[in-house]
Amino acid sequence: MLRAYERVNIARDIKRPKTDDYINNIFTEFVELKGDRLGKEDPSILGGIGLFEGTAVTVIGHRKGNNLDENLKYNFGMPSPEGYRKAHRLMKLSERYKRPVITFVDTPGAYPGKEAEENGQSVAIAENLMLMSALRVPVITFITGEGNSGGALALAVSDEVWMFENSVYSILSPEGFASILWKDASRKKEACEMMKMTAADLFSYGLIDGVLPEPKGGLQKDPEKAYEAVRNRIRESLPGLMKMTGDALAAGRYEKIRSIKREL
């Protein structure tokens, strides 16, 4: 049994499949859409329209990159408010044209820089949470690596949330948790255990809908298994969700959040 901090390391492995990889291997005829229509493009959020086995869907996810140059280009998957406003725009378009939304979460968190805060980071995240909670089309989320803070939640208020076995999902990074609680980021391993951030922990609390298995050593050892797991999950979940009315979908998300176990 792997410890929580070992799963964090696997989730952060640079060779782990990224949002681009899922899009290229699962969806066809994908067209990327850019910009927040207010003046800026944030490449750390990747979004657009594609086909899933003939069904038009909107796909949105955090983009980290597969090497240092790409990490820098995509700000290590830490979006600025422009990225969240782009995601908001794409989700509104999905609602207008009745396209389901598929999101991929893999971020250390929203970018905490001065410029991002001045440009409305918290407002952009809050507006995404509000929109997704009432969106009248199906939304399925996959947490594929690390999902930290509101920067992750801004793409994860969904009808179904699925986590890979070695992915993690938490209020902030373990380093940040340790820095706040103990003023000592080096205690990150201890923080990982306290935070209950693994897929198994979150499933036991009813915070996610299920756990997708991984090969020993992580998805980076056999990426095709990751694509197949996501493909099968969408194939199984999407038809039923698409039969539901917009009112039923929004009401279901509300009840899902309200039913989270009280001991949390």
Image (tube, rainbow, N blue to C red):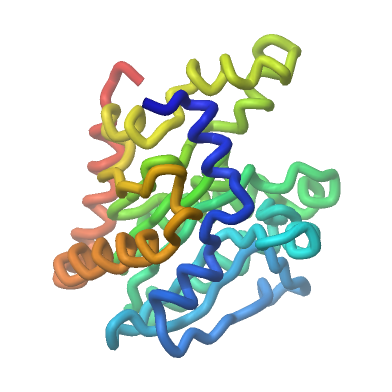
Q: Quadrant of residue 173?
A: top right
Position of residue 123 measured from the top left corner of the image (x, y, whole percent): 64, 49
Residue 244 in sight here: yes
- As drawn, 206 above or below 226: above
x%, y% of residue 132? 42, 57
Q: Using the rendered view, name the quadrant where residue 172 is placed.
A: top right
Say whether residue 248 is left or right of residue 254.
left
Residue 156 position in % (x across, y down)? 43, 51
Residue 98 vs residue 192: left or right?
Answer: left
Relative depth, front residue between 105 and 42: 105
Q: Which quarter of the rendered picture does the N terminus lie within?
A: top left
Quarter of the C terminus within the rendering: top left
Residue found at x 43% / y 83%: 50
The x and y percentages for residue 212 are: 31, 49
Check the image and name the residue furthest to the top.
Answer: 182
Would residue 180 be seen by someone viewing this image from the given angle? no
* Residue at screen point 53% across, 86% down: 31
Q: How many labels does the image show?
A: 0
Q: In this view, does 47 lie above or below 177?
A: below
- Identify which residue is drawn at 28% across, 49% down: 253
Q: Above or below — where is 244 with respect to 27?
A: above
Nearer-the-camera pick, 171 or 29:
29
Say which quarter of the image contains residue 137: bottom left
The residue at 53%/43% (across/down) is: 11
